[in-house]
Every structure is written in structure tokens, then in C-alpha cells.
Image (cartoon, rainbow, N blue to C red):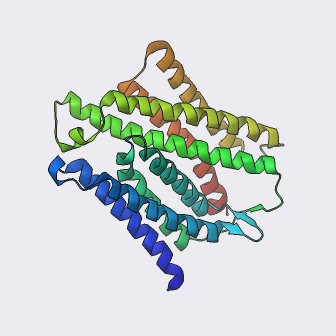
Amino acid sequence: MEHALLPISAIFLYLISGFLTGHRLFSKQEKRLPRFLTIAIGYLALLSHGIILYQDTMLAEGYNLGIFNAFSLVAFVIAAILLISALTKPVENLGIIIFPAAAFTIIFQVRFAGIMLLPDGTNWGLKVHVLISILAYSLLTIASVQAILLAILDKQLHERKTGTFVRAMPPLQTMETLLFEMIGVGFALLTAALFSGFYYLEDMFMQQVAHKTALSILSWIFFAVLLWGRIKFGWRGRKAIRWTLGGFVMLMLAYFGSKAVLEIILN
């Protein structure tokens, strides 16, 4: 029972924080709960999540990066980036999707425990590659959530709706600026991850990463075209949203799709 208490607490805190985010988005201004309350509960959830990850991932034999642990680790990094950014930028509304998603990754991590070790003696450069990859994926995931909320806001404005959701969100231009800041940093990290991956890649077919490499490159092309279009032609709005989500889908298939095939289907 004691072992289950921490995951239950983390899941509950994430869901409460997600609920409070939704309450702020869809309630009238005079009924909204304080912003700091949502962020504070989010930090408590993050702390509990971090302890769970440390216990399940940092094993004596090495780092357990099985698919459900990897899901949970990425969710933790995404939530951490969001909460840290929320201290200075109006991004806490992304928690309406990110916090419940983080809660579900903990459920899967605890329920379907598996082991895929990165041995403790692994070359430090490969460890750096894994870290950069996780950071790149996390930032581009946050960008995709931002793109989804941006699409909803854009649709509401085009339909001339000015409900509580529209009033609770930052201005459209601010959201677009934040979106491209996230994509820019995420793209730089993805580029570094690809270059470092090629350095340690000896035989992509023997190492069963050919599809992962191809999809990662395709995702990189999506984001490269998007940033080029933004600089050259001032792309924004729906076009930027489509390219962002397209690149994210490729990246998700590259990492978690390949892990699902290798660890669950092929075992």
C-alpha cells in the first residue's frame, strides 16, 4: 500500500492541477481561482512524479528506459518545462492537456512495468544523445499542444466568439510568438540529437533503428520547412499549426512508435 501511495498522490495532484487549469479557462474572471494555486499543485505533482521516476528508472544495473518509463520520463520533462516557463510566461493553460497526460503515463508506468536497460557503463556521449533527444521531444510536444490551443482560439475568433475561453487565453500574436520560440529551440535540440545519433550509429539495420532514423529525419524536414516559411513568407495561423502537428506526429512515431514495435509487438 505504501508503494502505491506516491503514484496515487502524483496522479491525483496532476488531475487536480489540470482541472484547475480548465476551471480558469472556462470560468468567468470573477470566479477564477488564483493562478499560483494551479502552478503550486503542479509543482507538488512534479515532485512526486520525479521520486517515482528515480525509483523505477535509476537501477543498480543502469537506466531503465522501457517504453512506459520513457513515456513517463518525457511527460515529467514536459511538465517541468511548462511549470518553469509558467513562472515568467503565460503558458500555464497548456496544463489542461499536459497534466492529465502526465497522470496517465504514471498509471501505465506502474501498471505495465518493463525493463530496457541503458547500462551504467554506457559511453557518456550516448547518454548525452539520449538526454538531448528527450529534451527535443519534450519541447516539440509542448509546441504541438500550444498549436492545438492556438487552433481552437483561431477558430473561435474566426467565428466571432468571445466566450470565457477566448478571454482567458493570451493574445493570438503572443501565442504564436511562444509557439515559434518553442519550435526554434526544439528544432535546434532535434538537430543536435540527429547528429549525435549518427555518430553512434554503426549499422542502422542491425541495430533496428532504420525506421526510427527515417521518421526522425522526416520530422526534422517538417520543422525546417516551417521555420523557413516563417522567416521567408511569414507563415502563421493554420498553416503553421498544420506543419507543427505534422512534424510532431512524425517525431512521435519515430520514438514511441519504434519502441512500441520492438518492446511490445516483437518483445
Which residue: 66% across, 60% down? 65
200 w.r.t. 232: above or below: below
Query: Is residue 205 rendered to the left or right of residue 46?
Result: right
Residue that protrudes farthest toward the bottom in the picture: 1
Which residue: 59% across, 66% down? 53
51 w.r.t. 5: above or below: above
Query: Is residue 196 rendered to the left or right of residue 91?
Result: right
Which residue: 79% across, 62% down? 120
Which is nearer the eye, 29 or 99? 29
Which is nearer the eye, 187 or 265? 187
Residue 246 appearing in the image:
yes
Which is nearer the eye, 97 or 20? 20
88 w.r.t. 6: above or below: above
Which residue: 71% across, 42% down? 210
Q: Quadrant of residue 204?
A: top right
Which is nearer the eye, 42 or 241? 42
156 w.r.t. 204: above or below: above
Residue 100 appearing in the image:
no
x%, y% of residue 64?
Answer: 68, 64
Query: Is residue 125 rendered to the left or right of residue 76?
Result: right
x%, y% of residue 91?
Answer: 39, 43
